[in-house]
Image (spheres, grey):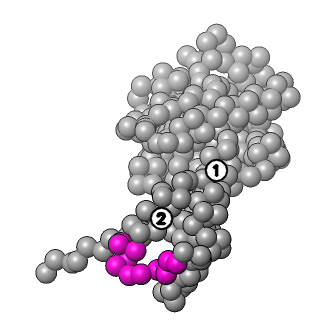
């Protein structure tokens, strides 16, 4: 059974009725509405046709609203106030970095970068409400495409499907060893000096594992699977206890992950192995320019922190 189609009045028609109810005169209401008197009269007649009811008793001297007209005008006034609030809300949200942004971040970035960046970001953009979700890259990408989050801060490259991305900065890998390791006293190490059999990495599923292996040209993952960790903090504790060596990203070092340990950190000689830190969002979103600005601000603040650390 088909539903009957209900014709709905327009905000313009309702606005004219409210103005007429206040002015109680077609001429004065037309001036207040910035339209001609004939246009206003036609708009009220159209509203009555839509509602199929009489709203105004017209006389030569004055305008009197019917009881229904008075009720409709009162409800219309509330409806127009809500419509104006919707417009004001949209205007507030359209300003750069205001309103709500839901950002996903991977565990090898979030705890080390965001504590230094977010307070300064909030001071620069006090109307920004940034909600964070921490998870692995694959699950964050799923949440991004489902609409659960708006942007994701992760390590690139990563196959995220139909997205736009903004590379923020390069994050160099350093070799971390126990303080009494043979390489601990060197000023720099070559990649070919790595002993893959003692190299400890995160478990599979962490993109840091793949990026570190690719950056250091470790082509045989089986050589690195004897001992694995689920977090960088666990990895650091394992190395500090003499169980092997590992590769640490610079942002984790800057973020204080070595605090309380005796680990030696050695840079690589020649071309530095790195991963890219980037921000991604759904392609075609109307907030693309805003998300690009967010990425630029994170990149700027991260660079300032790196310069201070040096």
Which part of the image, by quadrant, shows the C terminus?
A: top right
Q: Name the residue under label 2.
A: 41
x 80%, y 42%: residue: 124
Q: In which quarter of the image is residue 8?
A: bottom left
- Whether 74 is among the magenta residues is no
Residue lying farthest top?
270
Q: Contact, CB < 8 Å: mark 1 with mark 2?
A: no
x 46%, y 49%: residue: 144
Mark 1: secondary structure: helix
Mark seen at residue 46:
none
* Percent of width and height locating residue 292: 59, 34
* Percent of width and height locating residue 64: 56, 82
Q: Which of 264 and 126 is in front in this view?
A: 126
**Above/below status of 60 relative to 32:** below
Label 1 – label 2 distance at C-alpha = 32 Å
Does residue 115 appear in this view?
A: no
- Whether 55 is among the magenta residues is yes
x 54%, y 54%: residue: 36
**Above/below status of 231 relative to 250:** below
Q: Name the residue under label 1.
A: 91
Magenta range is 48-59
Q: Which of 167 and 85 is in front in this view?
A: 85
Mark 2: secondary structure: helix
Q: Nearer the viewer, mark 1 or mark 2?
A: 2
Q: How crowded is mark 1: few (under 14 residues within 10 Å), some or many (20 or more)?
A: few
Q: Quadrant of residue 80?
A: bottom right
Q: Quadrant of residue 83?
A: bottom right
* Percent of width and height locating residue 42: 43, 62
Residue lying farthest front?
60
Which part of the image, by quadrant, shows the N terminus?
A: bottom left
**Above/below status of 186 relative to 97:** above
């Amino acid at each position: 059974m088909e539903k009957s189609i209900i014709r709905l009045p327009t905000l313009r028609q309702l606005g004219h009725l409210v103005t007429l109810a206040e002015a109680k005169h077609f001429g004065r209401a037309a001036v207040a509405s910035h339209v001609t008197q004939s246009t206003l009269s036609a708009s009220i007649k159209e509203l009555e046709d839509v509602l199929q009811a009489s709203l105004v008793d017209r006389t030569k001297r004055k305008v009197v609203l019917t009881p229904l007209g008075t009720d409709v005008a009162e409800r219309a006034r509330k409806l127009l106030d809500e419509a104006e609030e919707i417009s004001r809300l949209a205007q507030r949200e359209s300003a750069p970095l205001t309103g709500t942004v839901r950002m996903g971040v991977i565990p090898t970035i979030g705890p080390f970068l965001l504590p230094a960046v977010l307070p300064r970001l909030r001071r620069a953009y006090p109307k920004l409400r940034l909600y964070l979700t921490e998870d692995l890259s694959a699950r964050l990408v799923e949440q991004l495409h489902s609409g659960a989050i708006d942007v994701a801060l992760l390590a690139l490259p990563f196959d995220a499907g139909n997205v736009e991305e903004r590379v923020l900065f390069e994050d160099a890998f350093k070799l971390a060893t126990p303080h009494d390791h043979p390489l601990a006293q060197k000023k720099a190490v070559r990649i070919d000096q790595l002993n893959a059999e003692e190299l400890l990495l995160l478990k599979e599923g962490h993109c840091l594992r793949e990026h570190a292996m690719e950056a250091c040209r470790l082509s045989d993952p089986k050589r690195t699977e004897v001992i694995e960790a689920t977090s960088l903090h666990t990895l650091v504790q394992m190395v500090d206890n003499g169980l092997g060596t590992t590769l640490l990203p610079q942002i984790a070092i800057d973020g204080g992950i070595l605090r309380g340990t005796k680990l030696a950190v050695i840079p690589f000689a020649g071309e530095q192995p790195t991963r890219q830190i980037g921000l991604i969002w759904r392609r075609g979103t109307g907030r693309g320019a805003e998300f690009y600005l967010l990425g630029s601000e994170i990149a700027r603040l991260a660079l300032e922190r790196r310069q201070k650390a040096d």
